[in-house]
Amino acid sequence: METKDNKPNIQVLERLYGVIRSRASSDPRSSYTAALFSEGPERVAQKLGEEAVETLIAGATGDVQKTIRESADLIYHLLVLWAISGISPEMVWGELESREGASGIEEKLSRKAQKSKT
């Protein structure tokens, strides 16, 4: 879906998440998503890591088109990990929104302080 300024709409991620959730209980022989769900969160995390490495390599070599394709694969597998972990996009958007306006350095320091209290 395109917005008025001809940029893809963030809702594509939410639609993809919905498709992932709807296919989670499908037949693993006919759905890659269902196959990932049937293999469990460890396998999904492994695939996410593989896609992250492939994206990094493509980016490091400067291959723009391959970086785009690998980024799409990476995002898909991230959404599968969220779904299998019971995390909704809204939860992540909320976390991002809570960080809005904070510098990255300040945000990281606050997380370290919170960890040291636990």
Image: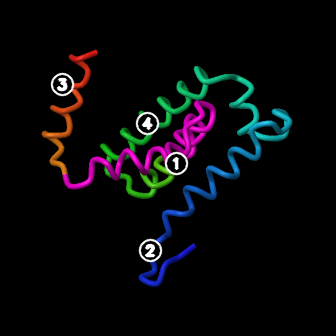
Q: Is residue 64 above or below residue 85?
A: below
Looking at the rendered structure, which numbered label has been put on residue 116? Answer: none
Q: Compare marks 4 and 2 and give the one earlier in the sequence.
A: 2
Q: Quadrant of the C terminus?
A: top left
Looking at the rendered structure, which numbered label has been put on residue 89? Answer: 1
Name the secondary structure under disc 2: loop
Q: Which residue is mark 4?
A: 52
Residue type at mark 4 is: Ala
Q: Compare marks 1 and 4 and give the one earlier in the sequence.
A: 4
Q: Position of residue 61 (x, y in %)?
A: 32, 45
Q: Which residue is rendered at x = 74% and y = 38% of the image?
A: 24
Mark-to-mark CA distance, 1 and 2: 20 Å
Name the secondary structure under disc 4: helix
Q: Is residue 83 magenta?
A: yes
Nearest to the observer: residue 93 or residue 76: 93
Q: Which residue is rendered at x = 21% and y = 17% of the image?
A: 116
Q: Depth-wise, is mark 4 or mark 3 nearer the camera?
A: 3
Quarter holding residue 40: top right
Q: Which residues are magenta?
A: 73-101
Q: Compare marks 3 and 1 and give the one earlier in the sequence.
A: 1
Q: Quadrant of the N terminus?
A: bottom right
Quarter holding residue 114: top left
Instruction: Check disc 2: other Cα within 10 Å, few if <14, some if 14-19, many if 20+.
Output: few
Q: Compare marks 4 and 3 and give the one earlier in the sequence.
A: 4
